[in-house]
Image (cartoon, grey):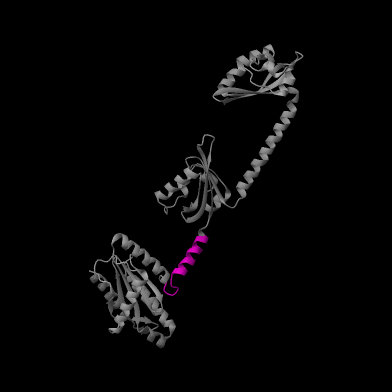
């Protein structure tokens, strides 16, 4: 039954809307066209939900047969199936085809523009399906990863995965993609030649009308060089340029972390404040160049002596601080202090000159007593001066007691 007709159709068939609404549309067509509608058009509509460019004959108000082209599209409104019929008078076919041609040309131009941008953009682009199988890549992708398009397409995006991120990292990424349809961040990836690089990555989710994921579009660029520069700046800001050891800033950061861990886990921390004995004499006798060599040698000896879980820092001049983490007893700390004095006392030979320095060590213990990092350093500094007053080349414990 006809539900509505527009003014153009009414002008063609020569009736008003009331004549057609709620009546069959068969009377609009010639007998032959009615038969063709029932035997061919309707079966196609029921099967495919649409037909295009069907040639029929309509009857106008003067009972003349008018050749038309018919298009029909099925739709559903309020759970009721409806059919939208569009008729083109054959004599207007050329105008219609010209408009269609212009539309296609415009679409082709837009597609060519999109393709040229895709190829020319300096950022790498990778498009995958819902299972992360690569569908397309641009030339910048090849330049960055080493994978040609023919090598990458059909592969899973895992070909770029490095071992630097754990399962939890990618699970969190996927959760955010599902929730927000977008993820941005930094990811370490691996090139075809197995070299690794850091990329700034943006992933966008593309969905169909049903909300199902159909594509992931990743846009990324290489930021390894900038990251390396940032790491160098950070290293320089937190390390002593002469010895390469952590400086006071990094020491305080590490000490604060250990204190926080100690408060949670009841672990013991020993802080040793070391001042070199006889270092001024080295500078006065051989000059500051020799003094620098001594500081570098002492730094190396201290690092070699300690466990990987411990830390040593040079906080200025001939002063060093050592952090011993999670030691069992006072005797353990004393043993380490004695070994430090021994290795520092060992002679050093530079340019056939033999140099000797000693070490006075003050020791402070943190054992969940509420002390701050500054207070702990002050206790060790005071104990170090007590060791110097006792004759140097010795160690003394501060106010903390370790059972």
Q: Residue at x 47, y 46 (%)?
A: 176
**On the picture, is 293 further left or further right than 24?**
left
280 and 330: which one is in front? 330
Location of residue 312 in the rendering, given as x and y in whole percent from the top left corner: 36, 71
Q: Quadrant of residue 392?
A: bottom left
250 and 134: which one is in front? 250
Image height of 35 relative to 113, above or below? above
Q: Residue furthest right?
A: 62
Q: Which residues are magenta?
A: 225-244
Location of residue 397 in the rendering, given as x and y in whole percent from the top left corner: 27, 75
Q: Residue at x 39, y 78 (%)?
A: 295
Tell me if residue 197 is in the magenta stretch.
Answer: no
208 and 129: which one is in front? 208
Location of residue 131 in the rendering, given as x and y in whole percent from the top left corner: 47, 40
Q: Is residue 52 visible?
A: no
Q: Residue at x 49, y 40 (%)?
A: 130
Q: Residue furthest top?
A: 31
Q: Quadrant of residue 338?
A: bottom left
Location of residue 60 in the rendering, given as x and y in whole percent from the top left corner: 74, 16
* Quarter of the figure with the N terminus: top right
**On the picture, is 78 further left or further right than 369?**
right
Q: Is residue 277 visible?
A: yes
Image height of 55 relative to 123, above or below? above
């Amino acid at each position: 039954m006809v539900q509505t007709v527009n003014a153009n159709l009414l002008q063609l068939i020569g009736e008003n809307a009331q004549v057609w609404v709620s009546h069959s549309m068969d009377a609009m067509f010639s007998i032959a066209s009615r038969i063709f509608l029932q035997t061919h058009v309707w079966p196609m509509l029921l099967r495919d939900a649409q037909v295009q460019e069907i040639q029929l004959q309509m009857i106008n108000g003067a009972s003349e047969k008018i050749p038309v082209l018919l298009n029909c599209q099925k739709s559903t409104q309020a759970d009721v199936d409806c059919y939208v019929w569009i008729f083109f008078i054959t004599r207007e076919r050329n105008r219609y085809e010209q408009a269609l041609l212009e539309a296609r040309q415009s679409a082709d131009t837009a597609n060519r523009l999109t393709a040229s941008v895709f190829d020319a953009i300096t950022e790498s682009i990778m498009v995958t399906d819902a299972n992360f199988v690569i569908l397309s890549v641009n030339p910048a992708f090849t330049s960055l990863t080493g994978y040609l398009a023919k090598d990458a397409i059909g592969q899973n995006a895992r070909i770029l995965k490095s071992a630097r991120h754990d399962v939890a990292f990618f699970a969190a990424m996927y959760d955010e993609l599902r929730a927000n349809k977008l993820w941005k961040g930094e990811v370490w990836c691996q090139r075809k030649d197995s070299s690794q690089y850091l990329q700034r990555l943006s992933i966008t989710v593309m969905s169909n009308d049903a909300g199902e994921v159909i594509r992931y579009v990743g846009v990324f660029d290489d930021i390894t060089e900038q990251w390396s520069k940032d790491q160098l700046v950070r290293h320089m800001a937190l390390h002593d340029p002469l010895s390469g050891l952590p400086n006071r800033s990094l020491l305080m950061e590490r000490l604060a972390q250990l204190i926080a861990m100690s408060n949670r886990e009841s672990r013991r921390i020993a802080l040793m404040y070391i001042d070199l004995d006889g270092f001024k004499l080295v500078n006065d006798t051989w000059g500051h160049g020799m003094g620098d060599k001594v500081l570098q040698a002492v730094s190396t000896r201290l690092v070699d002596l300690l466990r990987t879980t411990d830390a040593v820092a040079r906080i200025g001049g001939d002063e060093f601080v050592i952090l011993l983490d999670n030691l069992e007893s006072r005797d353990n700390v004393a043993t380490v202090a004695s070994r430090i004095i021994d290795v520092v006392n060992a002679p050093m030979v530079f340019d056939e000159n033999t140099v000797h320095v000693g070490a006075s060590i003050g020791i402070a213990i943190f054992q969940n007593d509420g002390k701050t990092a500054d207070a702990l350093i002050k206790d060790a500094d005071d104990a170090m001066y007590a060791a110097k007053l006792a004759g140097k080349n010795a160690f003394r414990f501060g106010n903390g007691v370790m059972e």
